[in-house]
Image: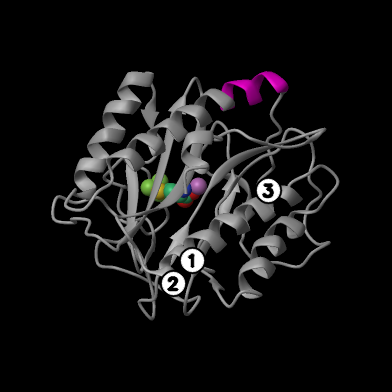
Protein backbone atom coordinates (compact mmCIF):
# COMPACT_ATOMS: atom_id res chain seq x y z
CA UNK A 1 0.00 0.00 0.00
CA UNK A 2 1.36 3.42 -0.95
CA UNK A 3 1.88 5.96 1.81
CA UNK A 4 -0.33 9.00 2.17
CA UNK A 5 1.63 12.24 1.72
CA UNK A 6 0.60 14.84 4.29
CA UNK A 7 0.75 18.48 3.16
CA UNK A 8 2.09 21.34 5.27
CA UNK A 9 0.09 24.56 5.65
CA UNK A 10 2.35 26.16 3.02
CA UNK A 11 1.68 23.27 0.61
CA UNK A 12 -2.05 23.64 1.18
CA UNK A 13 -1.85 27.34 0.27
CA UNK A 14 0.05 26.45 -2.93
CA UNK A 15 -2.59 23.83 -3.68
CA UNK A 16 -5.26 26.47 -3.18
CA UNK A 17 -3.73 28.35 -6.13
CA UNK A 18 -3.80 25.20 -8.30
CA UNK A 19 -7.35 24.50 -7.14
CA UNK A 20 -8.51 28.04 -7.87
CA UNK A 21 -6.95 27.87 -11.35
CA UNK A 22 -8.68 24.53 -12.03
CA UNK A 23 -11.99 26.04 -10.92
CA UNK A 24 -11.58 29.04 -13.22
CA UNK A 25 -10.89 26.68 -16.14
CA UNK A 26 -14.11 24.88 -15.29
CA UNK A 27 -16.07 28.13 -14.92
CA UNK A 28 -14.87 29.47 -18.28
CA UNK A 29 -15.90 26.26 -20.01
CA UNK A 30 -19.28 26.44 -18.29
CA UNK A 31 -19.77 29.96 -19.63
CA UNK A 32 -18.99 28.77 -23.17
CA UNK A 33 -21.30 25.75 -23.11
CA UNK A 34 -24.26 26.16 -25.49
CA UNK A 35 -25.95 24.12 -28.20
CA UNK A 36 -23.70 23.51 -31.26
CA UNK A 37 -20.32 23.92 -29.54
CA UNK A 38 -17.96 20.93 -29.82
CA UNK A 39 -16.10 19.37 -26.93
CA UNK A 40 -12.92 20.07 -28.94
CA UNK A 41 -13.65 23.81 -28.66
CA UNK A 42 -14.12 23.43 -24.91
CA UNK A 43 -10.72 21.72 -24.71
CA UNK A 44 -9.18 24.70 -26.56
CA UNK A 45 -10.52 27.07 -23.88
CA UNK A 46 -8.84 24.95 -21.24
CA UNK A 47 -5.51 24.84 -23.12
CA UNK A 48 -5.49 28.65 -23.37
CA UNK A 49 -6.32 29.11 -19.71
CA UNK A 50 -3.60 26.68 -18.57
CA UNK A 51 -1.11 28.71 -20.65
CA UNK A 52 -2.36 31.94 -19.12
CA UNK A 53 -1.75 30.57 -15.61
CA UNK A 54 1.71 29.32 -16.63
CA UNK A 55 0.88 25.76 -15.59
CA UNK A 56 0.83 22.35 -17.26
CA UNK A 57 -2.10 20.09 -18.03
CA UNK A 58 -2.50 17.29 -15.50
CA UNK A 59 -4.33 15.18 -18.09
CA UNK A 60 -2.48 15.60 -21.42
CA UNK A 61 -0.33 12.51 -21.97
CA UNK A 62 -1.47 10.94 -18.67
CA UNK A 63 -1.28 7.16 -18.60
CA UNK A 64 -3.52 4.89 -16.60
CA UNK A 65 -2.70 1.16 -16.66
CA UNK A 66 -3.99 -0.41 -19.91
CA UNK A 67 -5.00 2.96 -21.42
CA UNK A 68 -3.36 4.92 -24.26
CA UNK A 69 -1.87 8.33 -23.24
CA UNK A 70 -4.75 10.78 -22.62
CA UNK A 71 -4.95 13.13 -25.65
CA UNK A 72 -6.56 16.29 -24.21
CA UNK A 73 -6.62 18.77 -21.31
CA UNK A 74 -10.25 18.15 -20.25
CA UNK A 75 -12.59 15.21 -20.01
CA UNK A 76 -16.02 15.94 -21.53
CA UNK A 77 -18.53 13.17 -20.84
CA UNK A 78 -21.96 13.60 -22.46
CA UNK A 79 -25.23 12.03 -21.14
CA UNK A 80 -24.58 8.26 -20.65
CA UNK A 81 -20.81 8.87 -20.55
CA UNK A 82 -19.65 8.61 -16.94
CA UNK A 83 -16.09 9.90 -17.08
CA UNK A 84 -12.98 10.27 -19.30
CA UNK A 85 -14.97 11.40 -22.38
CA UNK A 86 -12.35 12.39 -24.97
CA UNK A 87 -12.98 15.80 -26.63
CA UNK A 88 -13.54 15.66 -30.38
CA UNK A 89 -14.49 18.07 -33.19
CA UNK A 90 -17.40 15.75 -34.06
CA UNK A 91 -18.86 15.75 -30.54
CA UNK A 92 -21.33 18.61 -30.78
CA UNK A 93 -23.43 19.52 -27.74
CA UNK A 94 -27.16 19.86 -28.27
CA UNK A 95 -30.03 21.30 -26.27
CA UNK A 96 -31.11 18.91 -23.52
CA UNK A 97 -27.70 17.25 -23.08
CA UNK A 98 -25.84 17.12 -19.80
CA UNK A 99 -22.06 17.25 -20.03
CA UNK A 100 -19.61 16.44 -17.25
CA UNK A 101 -16.43 18.51 -17.60
CA UNK A 102 -13.32 17.61 -15.63
CA UNK A 103 -10.42 20.09 -15.51
CA UNK A 104 -7.08 19.90 -13.73
CA UNK A 105 -3.81 21.83 -13.70
CA UNK A 106 -0.27 21.29 -12.45
CA UNK A 107 0.91 24.63 -11.07
CA UNK A 108 3.86 25.45 -8.74
CA UNK A 109 4.48 21.75 -8.14
CA UNK A 110 0.94 20.71 -7.18
CA UNK A 111 -2.21 19.55 -8.93
CA UNK A 112 -5.76 20.88 -8.60
CA UNK A 113 -8.62 18.74 -9.93
CA UNK A 114 -12.37 19.39 -10.19
CA UNK A 115 -15.46 18.49 -12.22
CA UNK A 116 -19.00 19.75 -12.79
CA UNK A 117 -21.96 18.47 -14.81
CA UNK A 118 -23.42 21.28 -16.92
CA UNK A 119 -26.82 21.53 -18.58
CA UNK A 120 -26.91 22.39 -22.29
CA UNK A 121 -29.94 24.67 -22.58
CA UNK A 122 -33.12 23.33 -21.04
CA UNK A 123 -32.81 19.74 -19.77
CA UNK A 124 -35.35 17.18 -18.56
CA UNK A 125 -36.48 17.15 -14.92
CA UNK A 126 -34.92 13.71 -14.65
CA UNK A 127 -31.52 15.03 -15.76
CA UNK A 128 -31.78 18.06 -13.48
CA UNK A 129 -32.60 15.86 -10.47
CA UNK A 130 -29.58 13.67 -11.25
CA UNK A 131 -27.36 16.78 -11.30
CA UNK A 132 -28.78 18.02 -8.01
CA UNK A 133 -28.46 14.69 -6.20
CA UNK A 134 -24.91 14.12 -7.46
CA UNK A 135 -23.76 17.60 -6.45
CA UNK A 136 -25.42 17.27 -3.04
CA UNK A 137 -23.75 13.87 -2.48
CA UNK A 138 -20.36 15.53 -3.00
CA UNK A 139 -21.14 18.06 -0.25
CA UNK A 140 -22.39 15.27 2.03
CA UNK A 141 -19.01 13.55 1.55
CA UNK A 142 -17.06 16.78 2.14
CA UNK A 143 -18.98 17.21 5.41
CA UNK A 144 -17.51 13.90 6.57
CA UNK A 145 -13.95 14.76 5.44
CA UNK A 146 -12.75 15.85 8.86
CA UNK A 147 -9.91 14.90 11.13
CA UNK A 148 -10.77 11.94 13.36
CA UNK A 149 -13.35 10.51 10.98
CA UNK A 150 -12.53 7.48 8.86
CA UNK A 151 -12.26 7.30 5.09
CA UNK A 152 -15.27 4.96 5.00
CA UNK A 153 -17.41 7.75 6.50
CA UNK A 154 -16.69 9.89 3.42
CA UNK A 155 -17.32 7.02 0.98
CA UNK A 156 -20.51 5.94 2.75
CA UNK A 157 -21.89 9.50 2.73
CA UNK A 158 -22.05 9.49 -1.07
CA UNK A 159 -23.44 5.98 -1.32
CA UNK A 160 -26.20 6.37 1.26
CA UNK A 161 -27.27 9.78 -0.04
CA UNK A 162 -27.69 8.64 -3.64
CA UNK A 163 -28.97 5.10 -3.03
CA UNK A 164 -31.65 6.40 -0.65
CA UNK A 165 -32.90 8.47 -3.59
CA UNK A 166 -32.88 5.58 -6.06
CA UNK A 167 -29.62 6.35 -7.90
CA UNK A 168 -26.54 4.14 -8.27
CA UNK A 169 -22.82 4.71 -7.72
CA UNK A 170 -20.57 4.14 -10.77
CA UNK A 171 -18.34 1.68 -8.97
CA UNK A 172 -15.50 1.30 -11.44
CA UNK A 173 -14.08 4.78 -10.75
CA UNK A 174 -12.81 6.37 -7.56
CA UNK A 175 -11.59 9.63 -6.10
CA UNK A 176 -8.02 9.90 -4.88
CA UNK A 177 -5.41 11.62 -2.80
CA UNK A 178 -3.85 14.54 -4.69
CA UNK A 179 -0.71 16.66 -4.35
CA UNK A 180 2.57 16.59 -6.27
CA UNK A 181 0.99 13.69 -8.19
CA UNK A 182 -2.57 13.84 -9.54
CA UNK A 183 -3.33 10.37 -8.23
CA UNK A 184 -1.94 9.69 -4.77
CA UNK A 185 -3.01 7.35 -1.99
CA UNK A 186 -5.63 6.78 -0.71
CA UNK A 187 -8.26 5.77 -3.24
CA UNK A 188 -11.63 7.35 -2.37
CA UNK A 189 -14.48 5.09 -3.55
CA UNK A 190 -18.03 6.45 -3.66
CA UNK A 191 -19.27 3.56 -1.54
CA UNK A 192 -18.17 2.01 1.75
CA UNK A 193 -18.91 1.24 5.37
CA UNK A 194 -18.95 3.99 8.00
CA UNK A 195 -16.34 3.60 10.75
CA UNK A 196 -13.95 1.66 8.49
CA UNK A 197 -10.74 2.53 6.65
CA UNK A 198 -7.88 4.86 7.51
CA UNK A 199 -8.33 7.64 10.02
CA UNK A 200 -8.36 11.10 8.44
CA UNK A 201 -5.67 13.53 9.57
CA UNK A 202 -4.88 17.22 9.06
CA UNK A 203 -2.72 17.64 5.95
CA UNK A 204 -4.48 15.00 3.87
CA UNK A 205 -5.82 16.34 0.56
CA UNK A 206 -8.47 14.33 -1.27
CA UNK A 207 -10.13 14.66 -4.68
CA UNK A 208 -13.68 13.55 -3.88
CA UNK A 209 -15.64 12.81 -7.04
CA UNK A 210 -19.02 11.06 -7.02
CA UNK A 211 -20.02 9.62 -10.39
CA UNK A 212 -23.72 8.77 -10.14
CA UNK A 213 -26.06 6.97 -12.55
CA UNK A 214 -29.82 6.85 -12.98
CA UNK A 215 -29.71 3.13 -13.86
CA UNK A 216 -27.07 0.43 -13.40
CA UNK A 217 -23.79 0.94 -11.54
CA UNK A 218 -21.97 -1.06 -14.26
CA UNK A 219 -19.83 0.59 -16.94
CA UNK A 220 -18.18 -0.21 -20.26
CA UNK A 221 -15.09 1.49 -21.78
CA UNK A 222 -15.43 2.43 -25.48
CA UNK A 223 -13.03 1.67 -28.35
CA UNK A 224 -11.00 4.84 -27.77
CA UNK A 225 -9.66 3.17 -24.63
CA UNK A 226 -10.93 6.00 -22.37
CA UNK A 227 -14.59 6.99 -22.60
CA UNK A 228 -16.59 5.10 -19.94
CA UNK A 229 -20.35 4.77 -20.46
CA UNK A 230 -23.09 3.27 -18.30
CA UNK A 231 -23.75 -0.34 -19.34
CA UNK A 232 -27.47 0.42 -19.79
CA UNK A 233 -26.81 3.85 -21.40
CA UNK A 234 -28.66 5.61 -18.58
CA UNK A 235 -27.61 9.19 -17.71
CA UNK A 236 -24.61 9.81 -15.46
CA UNK A 237 -23.35 12.90 -13.60
CA UNK A 238 -19.99 13.79 -12.01
CA UNK A 239 -18.97 16.52 -9.55
CA UNK A 240 -15.51 16.80 -8.01
CA UNK A 241 -13.69 19.03 -5.53
CA UNK A 242 -10.12 18.97 -4.23
CA UNK A 243 -10.52 19.10 -0.43
CA UNK A 244 -7.87 19.67 2.25
CA UNK A 245 -8.51 18.18 5.69
CA UNK A 246 -7.41 20.80 8.22
CA UNK A 247 -7.50 20.73 12.03
CA UNK A 248 -10.71 22.81 11.98
CA UNK A 249 -12.49 20.88 9.23
CA UNK A 250 -12.62 20.40 5.46
CA UNK A 251 -11.38 23.20 3.20
CA UNK A 252 -12.51 23.15 -0.46
CA UNK A 253 -9.45 24.20 -2.50
CA UNK A 254 -11.39 24.28 -5.79
CA UNK A 255 -14.17 26.46 -4.42
CA UNK A 256 -15.60 29.00 -6.85
CA UNK A 257 -18.76 30.71 -5.72
CA UNK A 258 -19.86 31.88 -9.16
CA UNK A 259 -19.66 28.39 -10.63
CA UNK A 260 -21.06 26.31 -7.77
CA UNK A 261 -23.86 28.64 -6.77
CA UNK A 262 -25.14 29.25 -10.27
CA UNK A 263 -27.03 26.01 -10.74
N1 LIG B 1 -10.48 13.62 -12.44
C1 LIG B 1 -10.25 12.38 -13.17
C2 LIG B 1 -9.49 11.48 -12.27
O1 LIG B 1 -9.24 11.86 -11.18
C3 LIG B 1 -9.63 12.65 -14.45
C4 LIG B 1 -8.49 11.84 -14.92
S1 LIG B 1 -8.39 12.04 -16.59
C5 LIG B 1 -6.90 11.51 -17.10
O2 LIG B 1 -9.16 10.36 -12.58
F1 LIG B 1 -6.82 11.79 -18.34
F2 LIG B 1 -5.96 12.15 -16.51
F3 LIG B 1 -6.77 10.27 -16.84
CO1 LIG C 1 -9.88 13.42 -9.93
- The local crowd at label 3, few if under 14, some if 14 to 19, many if 20 or more residues have their Cα within 10 Å, is many
Classify mark 3 as within 8 Å of ligand 2 or not, answering yes or no.
no
**Circle nearer the N terminus (1, 3):** 1
The residue that label 1 is drawn on is 130
Task: Locate residue 184, reporting x and y percent.
Answer: 58, 43
Q: Marks 1/3: CA distance?
A: 19 Å
- The local crowd at label 2, few if under 14, some if 14 to 19, many if 20 or more residues have their Cα within 10 Å, is few
Q: 188 left or right of 237?
A: right
The residue that label 3 is drawn on is 142
Placement of 54 over or under 156, stated as above or below: above
Q: How is the image coloured?
A: one colour
Report the disc number at residue 126.
2
Q: Which residues are magenta?
A: 9-15
Placement of 183 over or under 156, stated as above or below: above
**Circle 2 sits in a helix, a strand or a loop, which is it?**
helix
**Circle 1 sits in a helix, a strand or a loop, which is it?**
helix
The residue at the point 56 percent across, 35 percent down is 255
Classify mark 2 as within 8 Å of ligand 1 or not, answering yes or no.
no
Q: Quadrant of residue 235?
A: bottom left
Nearest the eye: 7 or 28: 28
Are the residues at dot 2 and dot 1 in contact (C-beta closer than 8 Å)? yes
Task: Locate residue 253, reporting x and y percent.
Answer: 59, 33
Amino acid sequence: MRKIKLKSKVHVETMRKSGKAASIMLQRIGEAIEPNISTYQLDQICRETIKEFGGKSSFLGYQLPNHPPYPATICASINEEIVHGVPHKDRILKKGDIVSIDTAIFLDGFHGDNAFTFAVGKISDQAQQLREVTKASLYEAIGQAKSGNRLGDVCHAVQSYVENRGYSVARDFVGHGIGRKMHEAPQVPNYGEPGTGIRLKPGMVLAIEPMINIGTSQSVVLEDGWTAVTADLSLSAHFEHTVAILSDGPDILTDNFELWNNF
